[in-house]
Image: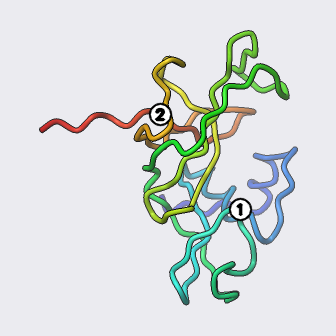
Amino acid sequence: MNTTISDKELLDAFPDTLIDHDNKEFYRGWLQHRLLLNRCVDCGHWHHPPGPMCPECWSRNVQPTEVSGTGRIYLLTKLHQGPPAPDVDYGQPHPVATVELSEQEGLRFTSTMINCALDRLVVGMPVRLNWIERWRAPYPVFEPAPRETE
């Protein structure tokens, strides 16, 4: 998607989120249904959360780059309480997973799991990125990856 999203549109879409120079492209990507994480142009190392410098080589030559959105559950939490959020009912455990993304060992992103029964969620499960709407804006979530047929 090559649509240009202005700073005003970005701030209007996320009125309760601190948007700054380091994370604006991360959130701009959300509006395009793209998960953009910083990657060092000099050494190729990915890092998240967004920051102005590569934690591997200290280069400031970092660029928001789209990830594939595939990976495996690294850590699984079932929340019984938390801040209010649309479509989140803490009367039932709310599944949140930290996913190690396929791009690089140690590159992890945490979000809600959808489209899977709680008792089927396990560490190591292959997952893929999906999008829901939350607070009238796109929000990245994960769901089980389809099984490959042989």
Q: Are marks 1 and 2 in contact (CB under 8 Å)?
A: no
Which comes sooner in the sequence, label 1 or label 2? 1
Q: Where's residue 8, x and y in %?
A: 80, 58
Local packing at callout 2 (Cα closer than 10 Å; few below 14, some 14-19, many 20+) is many
Work out whether 25 lies above or below 124: below
Name the one closer to the observer, 55 or 63. Answer: 55
Q: Where's residue 73, x and y in %?
A: 51, 42
Work out whether 149 lies above or below 102: above
Label number found at residue 36: none
Amino acid type at image mark 1: Pro
How is colour applied across the structure in the image? Answer: rainbow
Q: Where's residue 96, x and y in %?
A: 64, 33
Work out whether 119 lies above or below 148: above
Query: For the residue labelled by badge 1, is the local secondary structure a helix, a strand or a loop?
Result: loop
Please identify the quadrant where the C terminus is shown: top left
Residue located at (82% from left, 59% from top): 19
Mark 1, residue position: 49
Name the one closer to the observer, 27 or 61. Answer: 61
Mark 2, residue position: 143
Residue located at (71% from left, 66% from top): 50
Residue located at (79% from left, 47% from top): 14
Name which quarter of the figure residue 103 lies in.
bottom left
Would residue 18 appear left or right of 43 to someone viewing this image?
right
Name which quarter of the figure residue 62 lies in.
bottom right
Amino acid type at image mark 2: Glu
Local packing at callout 1 (Cα closer than 10 Å; few below 14, some 14-19, many 20+) is few
